[in-house]
Amino acid sequence: MTDDIRYAGAQGNDVSGGGRVGPKHPVSASQAVCSSQHPTVTDTMLQVMRDGGNAADAAIAGSIIQAVVQQDMTNHTGTVTALYYEAATGAVHELNSMGRIVPGLPAHHAVPGGKGLYAPVGTRGPMSVIPGFMPGMKALFERFATKPWDYLVAPAVRAAEEGHVVTSFEGHVYALTADFFLYTRSGREHFTPKGHLPQVGEVWAQPVLAETLRQLAAEGPDYFITGGWARQFVARANEMQWPITLDHMSVLPAQWREAKRWTHRDHEIVQLSAPERQAVFCAMVLGVLGHLDITSLGHFTESPLAAYYMAHTLRLASQDTGFINDPALFEDPSDLLMSEDHTAHLAAVLRRSLPKIDLTRHVELTRGRNALHAAGSASKQPAGSCELSLVDADGNWVQMMNTLQSGGIAGEVVGGVPMVGSHQMSTLSSPIAGWLTGGGGMRSILSNTLVLKDGKPVVALGSPGNVHCTVPQVLANIVEYGLTPDVAEDRPRMLPLADDYTLSIESRVSGDFVDGLAELGILVNPLPAYDAHMGSYQMSWRDSGKLYGTVGPRREGKAAAF
């Protein structure tokens, strides 16, 4: 049987399959679609589904090879989360496999001057945590996969052994972040095998990782949890005075949970449950904007008043979702924060807080007359994670994230597998954090999202980058403004309003828009026209009986369908 295969990617992709930053057109098909940030990953997922595998098979194979060809964004020790729509039952299953704190042990940070140098003297690096990536792969494989494990790992083995061509975006990120690994001996051996970082256009083979993956293919995911790689990890941790044991590697297995559901107009939105905060964040934002009838004001990247409301609402949601912690340790205020009464109250507060006078002169006096249209700078936010979006021929949907964040010992490489630890330093101010007692779970604000209508998925979306504030903007574009997902993704995006009334927004906005915000007391900080830190969505959607898939323009990527 010969299938009609369609690809979406920026023009000019090279023969290696390396992607390009820039516009990509949606693909459409009747049977299956998939998308990722890397053409090799997309090709792998598509081939698995063409071979008869389902969306779970393809997501596993895609994630494992992605941690070979995109180590600027992910690795085999980080976090895995997913929403899985099971066509046979109509159920949505949530998979959460974050890096895990070892309950009861003191926080471990590699100390400059010790055996693992990854940070300048006088600083503390991220906290060490138990890896979550492979427990997540194991959970998804055991519950939904149909293909043999070694078949799913085989593409990653080949990619590590034969090497992949380093893309321009990959090389750019390494140049910005490589110091993190160059403070450790194992990091230098891995990322500078020839005395320099992998160069753009260079074929980077990873023989040590290839051998690790061969063992993974032969022994299954437990090789990373209780087997040979796990023992190497524990030994390295003990050398660095982190007193974990092999038993700690399975202290908190990957969890299947009931996803958080909420409604907006005639759509049901499904996202990750507490302690994940995205569902509450999005429900608050869309609830407030609905009460403000924001669509009557125009789009929030064209109407200053609509932007004022959006920016403030993102700010309020950022603050309020800080109350959400692990429900095993804290009471859960999610339903209260998402309630109609709460969002109506916040909308009323915003209406009653509008300025009565033109504040442009205030902005000029405090920031300087030339500040209104001054050049800005890129947002300084974490960039590293990977999102996969898939729909298979049986109607199963997967929206999945795998990321380098929150896994292992920061800056160290074990068996060819680099690790970055958790963002958490000494407080809970980090976007990925947890309590050192209790169950060892961590909280974050991750983007996996399904939009249902009449009980069936119509849109699946997720992204790397600033997902806490960009997911509600993309959702608003779809369910409030009625834009198609690809157009919704392309619209300019903003960060929450800062305490000093500065609004960072992608610079594809008009001068009149900037002046209108100044009248409301807000100074615009123009970000790059397409800021990679503001996310680049992998999305699938269904319309009029056809499936569509796309990848955002802010980063590399490819969508494909058959």
Image (cartoon, rainbow, N blue to C red):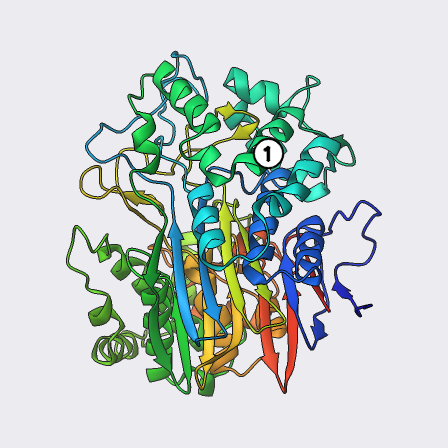
Question: Residue visible at 68% across and 55% down?
Answer: 42
Left or right of 56: which side holds 549? right
x and y, in percent, of residue 441 in the image: 28, 45
Question: Is residue 128 or residue 341 the one in the foreground?
Answer: 128
Label 1 neighbourhood size at 10 Å, few (<14), some (14-19), many (20+)?
A: many
The kind of residue tagged 1 is Leu
Question: Residue visible at 82% across and 68% down?
Answer: 2
Question: Is residue 398 or residue 469 the one in the foreground?
Answer: 398
Q: Which residue is labeled 1 in the image? A: 213
Please determine whether, in this image, residue 98 is positioned above or below residue 188: below
Please determine whether, in this image, residue 181 is positioned above or below residue 36: above
x and y, in percent, of residue 519 in the image: 43, 71
Q: Can the viewer see residue 76 in this picture?
A: yes
**Quarter residue 352 falls in:** bottom left
x and y, in percent, of residue 89 in the image: 44, 75
Please identify the quadrant where the N terminus is shown.
bottom right
Question: Is residue 361 or residue 425 the one in the foreground?
Answer: 425
Question: Residue visible at 81% across and 58% down?
Answer: 11
Please identify the quadrant where the C terminus is shown.
bottom right
Secondary structure, mark 1, is helix
Q: Can the viewer see residue 496 in this picture?
A: no
x and y, in percent, of residue 373 in the image: 56, 59
